[in-house]
Amino acid sequence: MTYMNIENCPVCGKVYAKNPWGMCLNCRRQVEEEYGKCVEYLREHRFCTLSELSEATGVSVRQITRFIREGRLSIVDNPNISYACDSCGAPIREGTLCESCRAKLAEQFSHLQADEQSAKHRGRRSSTVEFKISDRFRNKRF
């Protein structure tokens, strides 16, 4: 007896056999059609914005952004296309965070590392002191 790996499509909700795309074949075809529309429009309109691309093709800004982040749509030759930073919403052209948010995150991370280092050092020092005190009491007879 064999069992099929089935799931519900996250887009339409229909049951489908699991596949690498994570959606049913009908939705996959629709996504590919949307991708094709975006590619064709960008070839003819190099200086369009993200919202213009979305309006002209009928593809959501979210889906276009997904294409860009997946590396399927290149915006190198389209200077007016940018999408929102995941943290603050500032316009960016690559990655998920703007430079400012990346710098803040890096600063927070370095503070966290410094805090962990100092806590580790304090913990090591206090346990050493406790060990020495307990050694002294163990060796003494009352």
Image: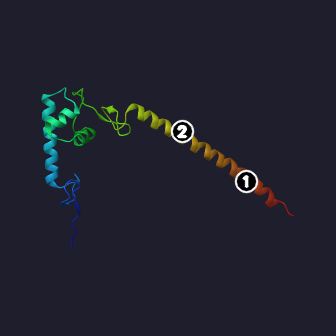
Q: Secondary structure at mark 1?
A: helix
Locate the C terminus and report the quarter of the image it occupies: bottom right
The disc at residue 111 is: 2
Q: Separation of disc 1 and disc 2 at Cα? A: 28 Å
Residue 83 in which image quadrant: top left
In depth, the one of 1 and 127 nearer the eye is: 127
Q: Amino acid at mark 2?
A: His
Q: Classify mark 1: residues with Cα within 10 Å, few (<14), some (14-19) or many (20+).
A: few
Amino acid, disc 1:
Glu
Residue 99 location, x and y as percent? 39, 31
Q: Nearer the viewer, mark 1 or mark 2?
A: 2
Residue at image x 13%, y 49%? Answer: 29
> Is the residue 18 above or below the residue 98 in the image?
below
Instruction: Pick out the residue farthest to the bottom.
Output: 1
Residue at the extreme right: 142
Which dot marks residue 130?
Answer: 1
Q: Which comes sooner in the sequence, label 1 or label 2? A: 2
- Identify the residue shown where x is 22% and y is 60%: 8
Residue at horizontal 23 percent and vertical 55 percent from the top = 10
